[in-house]
Image (cartoon, grey):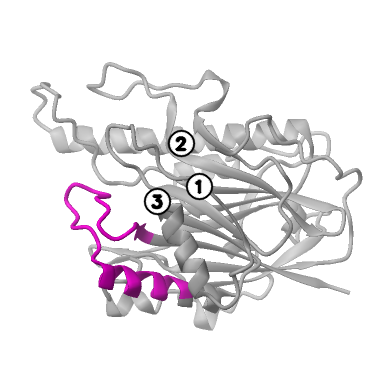
């Protein structure tokens, strides 16, 4: 008998407490604006009715708790998240995970790039050795004795990375700023791919990665996360697959998927990636991505409380198969702060 699982990714757009200064160029929410905001997010969560939801642009876990209290379906769900570091030069939004499925102990955050990875940006003297926004990693029991790794990410945006202290006389400062952002996004992608390879070495489990990639699926940073150029070794394939492209019930007549609009261009930059265990074309499949849906009607009306991103919902059908020896999660010994 098949079991259906529902995973979703949701960039909520700047969830912060009323009066909280989250960006220098943004006016903090009033109490009234905050109430409208958290009610709208709560409605979207109930509309998704997903088992596991990855969220981005969370400035306050207390605000997210207020959201869950407004829902019908997630008041008793497990919330995993962390507040941004208030001691940093500028406040950076965080990610979070909501699960109605059991979450194994030992969920972690990654702030530092793995394996001593670092890069130098044009015009910047100090190398970058941290993710732009931390990566969240949890192990979730999706069926009895069947665990899966779940990662929630938010890669660097395309917003040009201008530096006020840059005295370079190069004529195209805008181009240099865009290049910095591209390098940062690529570095985030490489760091995330390294994390995925590391957990596979510790313990082979299915993997789901979801979040705001700030790029389309065919872009190099996204494909780096997916494992561009990798091929199965010893019968094991550690590449990831974009759920939209492998869904078994894709309907071209209603193919209107997009999650972001910028300068009149409709793009899908929020993705849910899955390992071969959920790819129906794989001999190792224990389930399949049955359908991918985009909830984006709110983007047409542009209400102030609404997100500027569409929501991604993936339906996965388990086939009743199980993986051998899945009792260990293979989590690193870094507890969630």
Q: Residue 214 carries which label?
A: 3
Image point 77% across, 45% down: which residue? 205
Q: Residue 196 carries which label?
A: none
Residue 242 x, y percent position in the rendering:
59, 56
Residue 233 x, y percent position in the rendering:
77, 34
Q: Dot 3, how many residues are within 10 Å of its Cα: few (below 14), some (14-19), or many (20+)? A: many
If you read the primary sequence from the N terminus, does the residue marked by circle 3 or circle 2 appear first? 2
Task: Name the mark nearer the viewer: 1 or 3.
Answer: 1
> Is 156 in front, or is 228?
156
Image point 8% across, 22% down: which residue? 169
The magenta segment is: 13-42
Is 204 rendered above or below residue 47? Answer: above
Q: Is residue 64 toward the left or the right of residue 229 in the image?
A: left
Image quadrant in which the C terminus is located: top right
Residue occupied by mark 1: 153
Q: Is residue 33 toward the left or the right of residue 144 in the image?
A: left
Is 256 rendered above or below residue 160? Answer: below
The reply to whether the magenta stretch includes residue 24 is yes
Q: Is residue 269 toward the left or the right of residue 198 in the image?
A: left
Quick check: marks 1 and 2 in contact, CB under 8 Å?
Answer: yes
Residue 106: image quadrant is: top right
Q: Which mark is residue 188?
A: 2
> Is 288 in front, or is 143?
143
Is 275 rendered above or below residue 264? Answer: above
Real-space CA distance between mark 1 and mark 3, rounded to the nearest whole angstrom: 10 Å
The reply to whether the magenta stretch includes residue 254 is no
If you read the primary sequence from the N terminus, does the residue marked by circle 1 or circle 2 appear first? 1
Image point 18% across, 47% down: which residue? 24
């Amino acid at each position: 008998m098949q079991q259906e699982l529902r995973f979703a990714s949701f960039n909520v757009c700047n969830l912060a407490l009323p009066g909280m200064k989250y960006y220098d160029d943004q006016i903090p929410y009033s109490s009234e604006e905050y109430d409208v905001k958290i009610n709208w997010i709560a409605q979207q969560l109930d509309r998704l009715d997903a088992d596991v939801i990855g969220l981005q642009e969370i400035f306050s876990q207390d605000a997210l708790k207020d959201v869950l209290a407004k829902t019908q379906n997630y008041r008793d769900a497990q919330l995993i998240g962390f507040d941004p570091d208030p001691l940093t030069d500028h406040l950076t939004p965080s990610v979070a995970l909501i699960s109605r499925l059991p979450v194994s102990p030992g969920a972690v955050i990654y702030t530092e790039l793995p394996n001593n990875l670092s890069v130098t940006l044009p015009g910047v003297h100090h190398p970058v050795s941290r993710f732009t926004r931390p990566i969240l990693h949890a192990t979730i029991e999706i069926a009895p004795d069947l665990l899966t790794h779940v990662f929630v990410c938010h890669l660097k945006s395309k917003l040009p990375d201008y530096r006020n202290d840059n005295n370079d006389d190069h004529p195209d400062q805008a181009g240099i700023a865009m290049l910095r952002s591209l390098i940062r996004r690529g570095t985030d992608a490489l760091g995330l791919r390294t994390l995925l390879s590391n957990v596979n070495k510790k313990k082979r489990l299915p993997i789901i990665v979801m979040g705001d990639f700030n790029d389309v699926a065919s872009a190099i940073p996204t494909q780096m996360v997916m494992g561009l150029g990798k091929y199965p070794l010893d019968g094991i394939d550690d590449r990831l697959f974009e759920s939209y492209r492998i869904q078994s019930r894709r309907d071209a007549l209603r193919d209107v998927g997009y999650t972001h609009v910028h300068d009149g261009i409709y793009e899908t930059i929020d993705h849910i990636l899955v390992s071969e265990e959920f790819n129906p074309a794989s001999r190792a499949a224990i389930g399949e991505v049955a359908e991918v849906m985009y909830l984006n009607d709110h983007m047409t009306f542009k209400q102030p409380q609404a997100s500027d991103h569409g929501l991604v919902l993936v339906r996965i059908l388990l086939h009743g198969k199980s993986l051998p020896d899945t009792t260990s999660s293979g989590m690193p010994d870094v507890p969630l702060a």
